[in-house]
Structure formats: structure tokens, C-alpha cells
């Protein structure tokens, strides 16, 4: 997802520079507006946020350095725990609609974007997290990172316990929608029709973000992303787990390819068919479980309904 968003900026005649792991590394530079994008991989920014296993100090310092260089910056999310910073150097230039449409008009590019759950410009809305103002509030007085030795920011005395609640705070979709709606950078990068369509994605993302907001589920984040590469399966597990202890063993069994073994078989079967890419069958299984626990299973059904060609408002209305 991170790479796709970087590619979107690149192909929209915006110069791109990737930021990998721990510091700025030049990966590509095109033409048009100058953009620096940072692929915030698990070993770098996300790890520093406490979603992984390091202190937030590192993430604050790296972000402060980025914002010093690019005051017009924003934070975006991708698949799993991959996040990135995007900054634009003035002057800002409006991206024409045809430049965005070309991304999905190319069959090869469209297939790659579809595989990353980006079915059109509107999907970008769900990837936007926050702008520079909220980032600066979070950074506070942290000194900016100015070299390539990030390990100095985390000594043996540093508290490296995970702080998953921090990622939940950042994934505040209502606040993200407000930022997205008023960002000058967004208005230049996305044509108005695409921007308006993207705004409609935030209600779906709000439902998805509600899943890991459960403190019990948050404790499983590192395990899930360490053992599962499929973001669909990870989100399915978030949804199926909720706070039922016995579901942990159901997930373990599913991960080992075993069959359901208790009355919660609907949950396990939904996960199994989902990991095999059978979204229609997964939806049928979840529809059965949803009869007794709609608040638990609705968010994930909303998540992959677009892959089944189901409109979000109609799906939500039917479930209620």
C-alpha cells in the first residue's frame, strides 16, 4: 500500500523520494512538484511509534526532522503497519483529473492497485491519517533527527514496551476526514471529483479502525503482523477475536490449516476461506455469525464488501 501511494504521487507528475527504514534515502525523482515520501516501515517509524517494540521518541525525532524539511507534510497509512510521510515543496500545482484516471486506465497498473485494495482515487481517502498540525502537536518539543544513527535514540534505559493505543489515536478517522477536507496539499494532489469521492471513504475506515481500538485485540497486533502477510486476514482476525478468549485458539488452529473444532466454527471457517481469497464465501459465513453479534462482524464485512461490488451505505443499512 505504501509503495502504491508513492507510485500514485510519482505518476501524477509529482517528484517522489522514498524514505526507507531509518533515514532519507533517494529512490526516485521525477518531474513536477517536489515530493518527499517516507515509507514508514516496521523497523523505522512504526517501530518507533510503539506499534512495534521501540520507544515513540525515535518516531517523534524522525518526524520532527521531516517536518523541518517539508512543512507541508501529511501522514498516510498503508497495509498493516506500514505508514508514510508525504511532503511537498512549493509551488503546488493542481493535478489534472486525467492524470489520476490514467492510473486505473492502464490494465497492468490497475491490477496492481486492485491487489492493494485501491480500486480508484476514492480509496485514497481511507489511507490519509493526519496533517502537519496534528503531527506537530504530537511531536511537541522533541529535537529533530539530523543524522543516520537512529539507534542512539533508544538506549537500554528506554521504555520499549508497546503502546498500541498511540496508533489508535492516530487512526482517528473523523479527525482525519476533517484534515483531509481542508488540506491545501490534498486539493492540489487530487482533482475535486476524486477528493469528494475520497471523503466518502472515511465512514468505512472509521468502522475498520474501531476493531483494533479494543484493548484486548491490540495486544495481538505484533503477532498477527509477524505471522500473516495478508492484510485482509489480519483485519478478519481483529474482527473475529474481539474479546473472546477461546477465539485465540480458533485463530491458531486456522493458521495451522486445521478445521473448526467448537461452536464458533463460523468464525474460523470465515477466516479460512478468507485467507484462500474466497471473499464471497467469507461474507456468507460472516453473515451467519452476524445474526448474533452484528457489532462485532459488521466492520469487517464493510471492509471487503467493495471487493464484492457491494456499495457501503446499502451494506450498512441492510445489517442494521
Image (cartoon, rainbow, N blue to C red):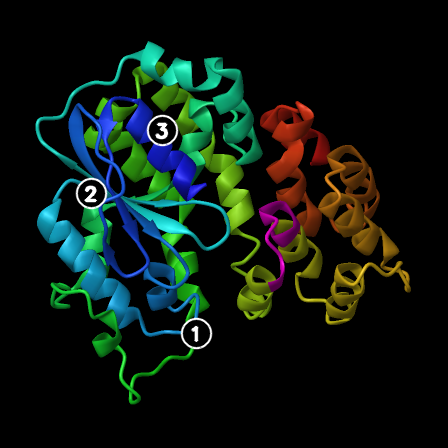
Q: Residue furthest front?
A: 27
Disc 2 marks which residue? 73
The residue at which mark 1 appears reads as 162
Mark 2: few, some, or many residues within 10 Å (few <14, many ≥20)? many
Residue at the far bottom in the pictured view: 157
- Of mark 3 and mark 1, the one earlier in the sequence is 3
Quarter where residue 138 is shown: bottom left
Residue 15, placed above or below residue 136: above
Contact between marks 2 and 1 (CB within 8 A): the answer is no
Dominant SS of magenta comes to: helix
**Residue at coordinates 20% horizontally, 43% vertically from top-left?**
73
Residue 102, quarter of picture: top left
Residue 228 in the magenta stretch? The answer is yes
Residue 8 circle label: 3
Mark 3 and mark 1 residues within 8 Å of each other at the beta carbon:
no
Note whether residue 138 is visible. yes
Q: Residue furthest top?
A: 98
In this image, 126 relative to 70: left or right? right
59 relative position to 3: left or right = left
Q: Is residue 58 above or below residue 16?
A: below
Res 218 visible: no
Question: In the shown orientation, is residue 262 left or right of residue 290?
Answer: right
Callout 2 secondary element? strand
Q: Magenta stretch: give its range.
A: 227-234
Amino acid at each position: 500500500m505504501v509503495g502504491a501511494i508513492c507510485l500514485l504521487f510519482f505518476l501524477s507528475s509529482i517528484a517522489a523520494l522514498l524514505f526507507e527504514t531509518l533515514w532519507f534515502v533517494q529512490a526516485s525523482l521525477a518531474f513536477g512538484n517536489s515530493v518527499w515520501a517516507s515509507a514508514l516501515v516496521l523497523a523505522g517509524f512504526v517501530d518507533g511509534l510503539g506499534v512495534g517494540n521501540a520507544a515513540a521518541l525515535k518516531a517523534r525525532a524522525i518526524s520532527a526532522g521531516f517536518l523541518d524539511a517539508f512543512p507541508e507534510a501529511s501522514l498516510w497509512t498503508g497495509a498493516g503497519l506500514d505508514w508514510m510521510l508525504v511532503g511537498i515543496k512549493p509551488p503546488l500545482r493542481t493535478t489534472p483529473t486525467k492524470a489520476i484516471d490514467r492510473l486505473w486506465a492502464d490494465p497492468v497498473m490497475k491490477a496492481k492497485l486492485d491487489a492493494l485494495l485501491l480500486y480508484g482515487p476514492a480509496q485514497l481517502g481511507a489511507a490519509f491519517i493526519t496533517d502537519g498540525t496534528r503531527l506537530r502537536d504530537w511531536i511537541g518539543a522533541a529535537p529533530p533527527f539530523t543524522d543516520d544513527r537512529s539507534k542512539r535514540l533508544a538506549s537500554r534505559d528506554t521504555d520499549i514496551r508497546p503502546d498500541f493505543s498511540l496508533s489508535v489515536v492516530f487512526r482517528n478517522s473523523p479527525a482525519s476526514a476533517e484534515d483531509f477536507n481542508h488540506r491545501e496539499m490534498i486539493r492540489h494532489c487530487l482533482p475535486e471529483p476524486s477528493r469528494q469521492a475520497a471523503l466518502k471513504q472515511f465512514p468505512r475506515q472509521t468502522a475498520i479502525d474501531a476493531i483494533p481500538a479494543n484493548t484486548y485485540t491490540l495486544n495481538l497486533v505484533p503477532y498477527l503482523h509477524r505471522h500473516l502477510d495478508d492484510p485482509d486476514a489480519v483485519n478478519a482476525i481483529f474482527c473475529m477475536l474481539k474479546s473472546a478468549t477461546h477465539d485465540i485458539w480458533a485463530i491458531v488452529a486456522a493458521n495451522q490449516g486445521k478445521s473448526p473444532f467448537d461452536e464458533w466454527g463460523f468464525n474460523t471457517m470465515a477466516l479460512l476461506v478468507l485467507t484462500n481469497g474466497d471473499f464471497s464465501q467469507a461474507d456468507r459465513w460472516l453473515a451467519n455469525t452476524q445474526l448474533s453479534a452484528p457489532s462485532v462482524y459488521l466492520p469487517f464485512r464493510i471492509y471487503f464488501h467493495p471487493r464484492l461490488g457491494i456499495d457501503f451505505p446499502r451494506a450498512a443499512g441492510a445489517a442494521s
